[in-house]
Image (cartoon, rainbow, N blue to C red):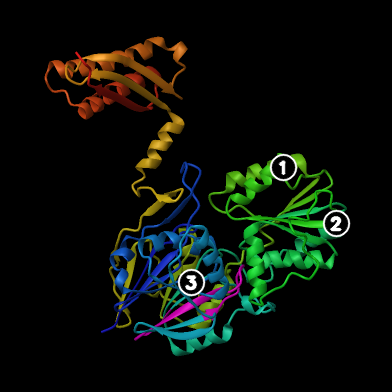
Amino acid sequence: MSKVRIFALGGLDEDGKNMYVVENDDDIFVMECGLKYPEGEQLGIEMIIPDFSYLVEHKDLIRGVFITHGHDDVMAALPNLLKEIPDVPIYMAPLTAMTFERHARKLGIREYNLHRIQRNSTFTIGHTEVRTFGTTQSIADGFGVALKTEDGYVVYSSEFIVDYDTRTEAFTFDITNITDLGNEGVLALMCESVGSTREGHSAPRHRISSQIEPYFEDAQGRIFITVYNQNIYRVIEIIELANKYNRRIMIYDDELKAIMNDMAKLGYYHVPAGLEVTAGSFDNSLENVVVLVAGTGSSIFRKVHKIATKEDEHIEFRSTDTVIIASPAVPGTEREEASMEDDLYREAGNVIAVDAKRAFTMHASIEDLKMMIYLMRPTYYVPVKGEYRQLIANANIALDMGYNADKIIVMDNGQIATINNGKLQKNFDSMEADDVMVDGNENLDTSGMVLKDREILSTDGAIIVGVVMNHATKEIIGGPDVQSRGVIYLKDADYIVKQIGDIMEKTINDAVKEKRYENMGCRAEARDKIARYVLHETGKRPMILPAIVEINTKD
């Protein structure tokens, strides 16, 4: 009896945090391990990652974690997983592996179980045959994964577009391998949904050359272009334009320079000889140059802000500069992107934003998805990777191609589709699939209590009330001292401050008198009473922090 289970620990009904799990009998395979950027109200959060509890609990059954390309939304949480399961087997293509190893060194991760694989290969892990196939996406070495089960392959498409004009081998779409999989039989196809609301094919509208070339023709001064350092396809387009118009290029981002060096080492792409200006030899007076200002997430916007406010030690904008924004905001970075544009319009002479409606992201549009379904001919179709509206739009594409609703599996994170002997079980099982907030290098709780505290502090402030007591006699010998931050202006509210102190003092004295004093309980009682009083007087619900310090005194 064969049993296949498919579920997501992240990536469904959200943009990012991708992590999909396929269980083939007793073999567990994981696709991706990514992050999501925090929303504006998630104060102090660096990133959001999947909850790895299920994987930790079943770590002995994990046969492999496949990272299909080098983007943050599929790879950046891998160091966090390695803290939980240090020896988990990881499978990556060469460029992705080089990027990961560089990040691991920075984080002090020295030991991991990394396997380099080719984009089009066949091998066996555990009891399962695995096939990979090359996909065209915005970074080189992208691939999809096919896991062979008794009832056919379970295929994860990764990100892809269908582009027949890609000449660089590391970006090609392996249509032959995909067709072979379809001919052998596909049980389930897990297909990305990010571009499922866009008509037509993504190609050739994924290219920006036609949009920005006129500015290369007309610009009299320097050209600055903001670009994500993981969008290598777009970076190569810009380098080729610079070469065509005899402009030298300066890559202003260490990570992008490292990736381009990796591309050269692997023979994927070489920056034309003599074209690049190194950061050490760059001078702000240099003319006829293209400066690539690159980064990831919101870091790129902060970098531009630093240049615009004249805080950067190498670059300063001039009124003759042309600035092209080719790094559209990703979810969670909209505020920083808007602020960056504001800064640019103040300092640069000519600011242009690449039109996202004319330059598609390199995700599968409707006709790309139709082609993948047509070539694979899966028994079951599983939309993954996208917000809920995108998952539904992707499901509707399969419906339009003649699939019945019972053959299309739309799930939430944590829902489990079980296929026994090739037949989908009607009722879905479920498990916890919470968000895990990462603050710096440490994980916060998944319940959100830390974030709620931060929200209270940011909106209603805090009041700290402290007293000092004689530990032996329980007599108050110091205070009460009241400090308010972000609630009231103390000089204008002496009566409130006095009353808060009186409440604290009375609470303690009553408890001592009634012989029920206990430090923690007394603080909780005072907190409740002070909170009710402050709400009545100010309409605010600040964080109340009572402190009772007990000391031993000499008679």
Q: Is residue 225 left or right of residue 546?
A: right
Task: Say which of 220 and 307 sits in front.
Answer: 307
Q: Nearer the viewer, mark 2 or mark 3?
A: 2
Q: Residue furthest left?
A: 515
Q: Is residue 344 left or right of residue 122?
A: right
The residue that label 1 is drawn on is: 308
Q: Is residue 140 magenta?
A: yes
Q: Is residue 123 visible?
A: yes
Q: Is residue 396 visible?
A: no
Marks 2 and 1: in contact by CB < 8 Å?
Answer: no
Where disc 3 sits, the SS reads strand
Q: Disc 2 marks which amino acid?
A: Asn
Q: Which mark is residue 191?
A: 3
Spatial CA distance of label 2 from label 3 is 44 Å
Q: Residues within 10 Å of mark 2 (few under 14, many from 20)?
A: some
Spatial CA distance of label 1 from label 2 is 20 Å
